[in-house]
Image (cartoon, rainbow, N blue to C red):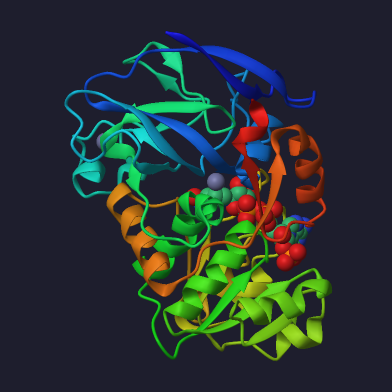
Amino acid sequence: MRNTKAYAAYNATTPLAPFKFQYRDPDPNEIEIQIQYCGVCHSDLHTVRNEWGGTNFPVVPGHEIVGRVAKAGKRVKKFKEGDLAAVGCMVDSCRKCAACKAGEEQFCEVGPIFTYGCPDKKHDCLTYGGYAEAIILDEAFALRVPKFSNLAAAAPLLCAGITTYSPLHHWKVRRGQKVGVVGLGGLGHMGVKIANALGARVVLFTTSPGKTEDAIRLGAKEVVISKNEAEMKKHVNSFDFILDTVSAPHSLDAYLELLKRDATLVLVGAPPQPLPVKASNLIGKRRSFAGSLIGGIAETQEMLNFCSRHGFACDIEMIPIQKINEAYERMIKNDVKYRFVIDMKSLA
Ligand code: NAP
Ligand code: ZN
Ligand code: ZN
């Protein structure tokens, strides 16, 4: 057992502040990672402000983690001390249910053990995330890090990358298709890059006119300011697929109308409030409305390898941990380009 430095939210209304917890020694199948970088996801913000309800305080957020293996238990095969390793949104699951057997641990029927704020019965504790010096987990849920020119920029792939890669993959987005991405934040900017790398013709929908140039640089062929109804109408019945990454209430009907017959709108954004849908927008053209949650462990490794092979990661702004509350305020104002990453050296 040893003291581990971190930052935590102690409740839903006060700023994040320094926190210390006692960490176990790694089990034989576990590794301890000394965290170098951790991305800042909008889910961290929803959680610390208890916007979805059910947050277990104090919560140490962070599920976009990269670092070096500091200790490896004696049964660990995939890693040795000194290797790079990464952790996303889950640290374990039951491994026995149909979802786990299918490699879709995110849909574990018992419930995955999420990286932070989640009861871990085996170790009789709550999980603590990446806004910390270290994390300990079973090697089966840790990812290998392929070559990236900037390791810090790879951290947000562990959530923003997989959450956009998985639905693009599942719905078989391919060359020549017209694909919409709604919202240019952490998830959205990776949706644009990945859909573009798959050969799709990407149209980015944004509420922020100032992001137009960046969207084109990131791979979009066209940018639509979603508040402009006339611009939106030009795209009615034309999309093969739309990925919606918006974190706040917004009109789904505005995007359902833009789908072709039989096409699908997938929501990955998780606004806390229910969102209405007009039946005729689904019935009329047999359109589908679906959701998607991160991705399985094997698929996360596949996504890391895909991004490395294509030579891209995330566009990031590095911050010290002491700036985390400011980063959250900027996130609420849609002022993120396009992911904050915490340099964990700043905890020392
Ligand atoms: P983010 O970086 O804050 O980006 C969200 C973007 O949504 C903003 O940059 C903005 O883009 C747009 N937006 C915000 N408020 C809006 C509004 N009122 N109307 C229209 N557009 C608005 O957040 P993120 O980290 O990408 O996360 C996005 C959402 O996905 C969050 O709800 C998060 O919890 C969820 N999430 C889900 C999963 C999953 O597995 N399904 C995984 C990770 C995160 P523009 O400025 O371009 O309009
Ligand atoms: Zn996330
Ligand atoms: Zn399971």
Residue 336 in which image quadrant: bottom right
Query: How many dots with numbers?
Result: 0
Compare residues 77 and 237 and report the one nearer the observer: 77
Residue at image point 56% right, 42% down:
37
Residue 210 in which image quadrant: bottom right
| Quarter of the C terminus within the rendering | top right
Left or right of 343 in this view: 110: left
Residue 166 in which image quadrant: bottom left
Compare residues 150 and 95 and report the one nearer the observer: 150
Q: Position of residue 106 (x, y in %)?
A: 37, 43
* Position of 8 relative to 46 (above/below): above
Left or right of 80 in this view: 59: right
Q: Position of residue 140 (x, y in %)?
A: 26, 37
Residue at image point 80% right, 81% down:
229
Compare residues 219 and 294 and report the one nearer the observer: 219
Residue at image point 54% right, 33% down:
130
Q: Residue furthest front?
A: 82
| Quarter of the N terminus within the rendering | top left
Q: In the rendered image, is residue 225 in sight? A: no
